[in-house]
């Protein structure tokens, strides 16, 4: 059994948090980037800012339900476990009580194997039983009955090693070499490369490459590059005031100017860069967590 689980625990005067992180093991690595287990005890309701993201994640929650908003001020749904697709804008999640579960970040290949055309999940949040049927609900139940993070992650390794196309709807689905190559180029440049010349190098027309990229990865190449660039800027925001300014971050990440960066921040995070910096310190009313893959990884 793989046991190298990285567990972090911290407390504030309003809450207690624990996270457990491990990469997928064995054959499960083909379908899954990794697991993030979480457990939170909240003495009062809190809001969490969810940043625009690319990729498909399974939120296999077995604690209290949480309220997921459509965008920053849209209608709210009370959900347990669910699937979240690529998100083109920011949203808020209302948390309370005892939050407990595992977030499974699917690889691009795993998402296609599981769901087929992942673009159908764009900006969607779908209850687990609707997205994956009875086996998905059963998996959540099994995770809740497991005693340790090690047992939960081992269970997930087994599931994703033995059932790569769990819904049976994606037979033969795969990431094409051209899409995979284009994605690697965008990641390698942090989203700063000019997208059109790279699209031309695939040998496909721009219309075809955009359609296939969107079908297999959920978003267009330009949208993917935009989110990659913003993710890099989010990392550098932590250094503002320690030798960098907001203008420095904007320039380093390939924005035209600070105003361009601010507009993207409002669109993709729902607030200004200065507000995000303020949220990352102390115990803010809206807690910011960046939960998708690190800049530069190509699962």
Image: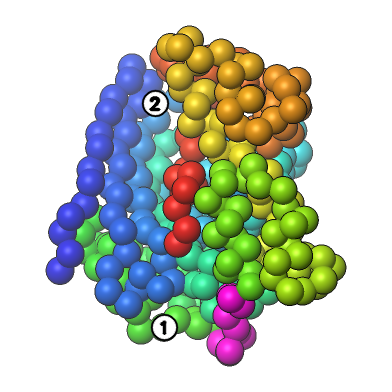
**Secondary structure type for disc 1:** loop
Task: Return the disc, 2 or 1, that comes first in the chain's sequence.
Answer: 2
* Other residues around mark 2 within 10 Å, as few (<14) / some (14–19) / many (≥20): few
Which residue is at the front of the view, 184 or 156?
184
Q: Does residue 77 appear in this view?
A: no
Q: What is the span of residues highlighted in magenta in the rendered image?
A: 168-177
Q: Residue at x 45, y 53 (%)?
A: 297
Tell me: residue 96, above or below residue 132.
above
SS at badge 2: strand
Tell me the residue that label 2 is attached to: 43
Q: Can residue 108 be seen in this view?
A: yes
Foreground pick, 119 / 68: 119
- Quarter assignment of residue 155: bottom left
Q: Please name the residue shown 58% across and 57% down the image.
A: 185
In the rendered view, would you say 229 is above or below 151? above
Type of secondary structure dominating the magenta stretch: loop
Q: How was this image coloured?
A: rainbow
Side of 39 relative to 91 (left or right):
left
Query: Does the magenta portion include 176?
Result: yes
Position of the N terminus by quadrant: bottom left
Please state, as top left, top right, bottom left or bottom right, where the C terminus lies in the image. Answer: bottom left
Identify the mark at residue 209; answer none if there is no mark: none
Q: Do the residues labelled 2 and 1 touch (CB within 8 Å)?
A: no
The answer to which of 164 and 249 lies nearer the viewer is 249
Residue drawn 49% across and 38% down? 290
Residue at which label 1 appears: 163
Q: How far from the left and from the top, in percent, is residue 201?
A: 70, 66
In depth, the one of 203 and 297 nearer the eye is 203
Report the Cα–Cα distance between label 2 and label 1.
39 Å
| Circle 1 Cα neighbour tier, 10 Å, few/some/many (<14 / 14–19 / ≥20) | some
């Amino acid at each position: 059994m793989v046991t190298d689980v990285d567990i972090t625990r911290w407390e504030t005067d309003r809450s207690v948090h624990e996270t457990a992180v491990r990469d997928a093991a064995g054959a499960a690595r083909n379908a899954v980037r990794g697991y993030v287990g979480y457990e939170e005890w909240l003495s009062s309701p809190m809001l969490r800012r969810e940043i625009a993201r690319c990729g498909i994640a399974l939120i296999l929650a077995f604690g209290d339900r949480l309220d997921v908003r459509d965008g920053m001020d849209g209608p709210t749904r009370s959900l347990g476990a669910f699937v979240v697709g690529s998100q083109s804008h920011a949203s808020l999640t209302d948390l309370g009580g005892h939050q407990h579960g595992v977030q499974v970040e699917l690889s691009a290949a795993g998402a296609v194997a599981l769901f087929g055309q992942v673009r159908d999940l764009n900006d969607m949040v779908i209850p687990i039983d609707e997205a994956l049927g009875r086996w998905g609900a059963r998996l959540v139940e099994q995770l809740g009955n497991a005693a340790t993070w090690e047992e939960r992650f081992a269970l997930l390794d087994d599931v994703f090693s033995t059932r790569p196309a769990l819904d049976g709807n994606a037979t033969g689905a795969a990431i094409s070499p051209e899409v995979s190559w284009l994605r690697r180029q965008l990641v390698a440049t942090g989203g700063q490369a000019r997208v059109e010349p790279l699209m031309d190098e695939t040998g496909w027309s721009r219309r075809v490459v955009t359609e296939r990229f969107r079908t297999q990865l959920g978003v267009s190449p330009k949208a993917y590059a935009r989110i990659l660039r913003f993710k890099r800027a989010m990392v550098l925001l932590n250094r503002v005031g320690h030798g960098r300014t907001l203008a420095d971050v904007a320039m380093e990440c390939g924005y035209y100017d600070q105003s361009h960066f601010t507009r993207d921040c409002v669109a993709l995070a729902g607030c200004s860069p200065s507000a995000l910096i303020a949220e990352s310190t102390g115990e803010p009313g809206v807690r910011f967590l960046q939960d998708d893959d690190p800049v530069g990884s190509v699962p």
